[in-house]
Image (cartoon, helix red, strand yellow):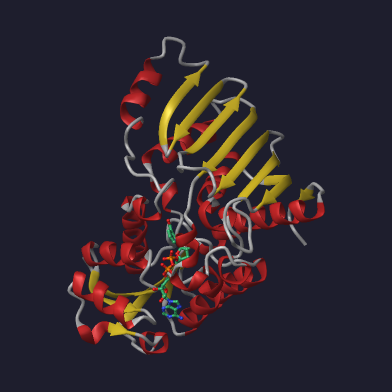
């Protein structure tokens, strides 16, 4: 390793996953933690043997340390851009949890701050690293599915009232979560949707709040038209008891691929008539990912996070951009905001949003 860096994590909910990955990663000299909640700070610090001198309740104190080069921002979503901008201005490289922020104005500001400070900005979308999703991306990009016709992206999850009430009740609020089941839980699958299918041309949607006492939606359903002409569906909910899988189904004129929780279950291609490749792909990709956040947010797989955090560290050491750059975090948020506008107005909404 040419050199090692100081890595700080702010916000220790899902941030715990960043801590676990950073303490195990190559190229890390030390890990620093920051959380407003002293009890959480002590607990996570003790669990991972973090030097008490590297534990902070004050974010500004983290930013003042020149030996910290990368900061993971894992606070509630409505704080992301402001905190990331502070960190970039302090000369840090920044990895921000999804969504990058909850408005396009804030997202544009943080992307611009990264350009101006000449620092790297990454956005966590760990599902892009799962082997099944990488295989689907490769298939779609190869053109072997023919002309894309239709696709379904369904996140039928379940969250309890306690989940929304906990942690100060920021989840499901417009200000801090930017939305409900779509902006928080389904943003991963909406990112995959546009990563696989290409840009979205328009959405026609309905949203509703069925089972929780929250400001925002716990169900969103959209008819999605892609720029390539395909028309598909998106469903995102946290009210589908008991919380089932994430389904991805893509159909073209010469093939189809289905995945459940990032594991490939169907692989049908006109150019694989004896089904040799189908058998190989299913053997390799059908049972890869065992964990699912369908019913329990704590059961979300941590492998993708570890890969993205290691990539961020190597990006800084090798002086090259991270694998998922901050500006890519804009696409999913724009689609979600278009869905909200469509549900509000009852009209088909075309992208880009003004
Ligand atoms: N990639 C994923 O799969 C995934 C999973 C869960 C959450 N997330 C994202 O991570 C973010 C956090 O979500 P969460 O579920 O971990 O929330 P959480 O409420 O469990 O944790 C947030 C933590 O941030 C701390 N905090 C808040 N403001 C702070 C500040 N100004 N300075 C320091 N600490 C502060 C809180 O004390 C709390 O411990 C959200 O943006 C969410 O969308 C991503």
Residue drawn 36% across the image and 71% down it: 12
* Image quarter of residue 66: bottom left
233 relative to 345 in the view: left or right: left
Along the line of sight, which residue is nearer the eye, 186 or 320?
186
Q: Can you say which quadrant of the picture contains the N terminus?
A: bottom left
Picture quadrant of ligand 1: bottom left
Can you name the residue that lies furthest to the top here? 274
Numbered circles on residues, count:
0
Along the line of sight, which residue is nearer the eye, 60 or 294?
294
Q: Where is residue 159 in the image (x, y as percent from the top left)?
A: 48, 53
47 relative to 118 in the view: left or right: left
Q: Position of residue 236 (x, y in %)?
A: 58, 46
Q: Where is residue 320 in the image (x, y as percent from the top left)?
A: 41, 63
87 relative to 52 in the view: left or right: right
Q: Can you say which quadrant of the picture contains the C terminus?
A: bottom right
Along the line of sight, which residue is nearer the eye, 270 or 151?
151
Is residue 117 among what the camera can see? no
Q: Is 1 rendered above or below residue 194?
A: below
Is residue 349 among what the camera can see? yes
Residue drawn 53% across the image and 58% down it: 184
Can you name the residue that lies furthest to the left here? 49
């Amino acid at each position: 390793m040419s050199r090692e860096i100081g890595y700080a994590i702010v916000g220790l909910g899902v941030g715990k996953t960043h801590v676990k990955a950073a303490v195990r990663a190559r190229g890390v000299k030390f890990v620093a933690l920051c959380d407003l909640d002293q009890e959480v700070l002590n607990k996570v610090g003790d669990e991972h043997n973090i030097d008490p001198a590297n534990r902070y309740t004050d974010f500004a104190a983290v930013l003042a340390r020149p030996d910290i080069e990368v900061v993971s921002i894992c606070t509630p979503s409505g704080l992301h851009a402001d905190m990331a901008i502070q960190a970039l201005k302090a000369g840090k490289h920044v990895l921000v949890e999804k969504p990058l922020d909850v408005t396009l104005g804030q997202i544009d500001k943080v992307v611009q701050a990264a350009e101006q400070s000449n620092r790297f900005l990454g956005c966590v979308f760990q599902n892009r690293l799962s082997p099944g999703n990488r295989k689907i991306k490769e298939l779609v990009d190869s053109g072997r599915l023919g002309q894309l016709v239709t696709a379904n992206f369904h996140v039928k999850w379940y969250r309890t009232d306690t989940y929304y009430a906990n942690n100060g009740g920021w989840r499901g609020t417009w200000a801090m979560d930017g939305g409900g089941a779509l902006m928080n839980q389904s943003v991963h699958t909406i990112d995959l949707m546009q990563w696989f299918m290409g840009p979205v041309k328009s959405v026609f949607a309905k949203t509703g709040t069925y089972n929780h006492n929250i400001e925002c939606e716990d169900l969103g359903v959209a008819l999605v038209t892609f720029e390539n002409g395909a028309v598909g569906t998106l469903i995102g909910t946290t009210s589908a008891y008991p919380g089932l899988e994430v389904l991805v189904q893509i159909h073209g004129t010469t093939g189809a691929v289905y995945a459940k929780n990032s594991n490939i279950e169907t692989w049908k291609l006109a150019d694989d008539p004896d089904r040799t490749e189908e058998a190989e792909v299913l053997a390799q990709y059908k049972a890869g990912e065992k964990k699912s956040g369908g019913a329990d947010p704590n059961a979300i797989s941590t492998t993708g996070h570890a890969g993205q955090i290691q990539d961020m560290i190597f990006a800084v050491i090798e002086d090259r951009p991270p694998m998922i750059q901050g500006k890519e975090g804009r696409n999913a948020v724009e689609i979600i905001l278009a869905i909200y506008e469509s549900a509000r107005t009852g009209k088909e909404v075309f992208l880009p949003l003004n």
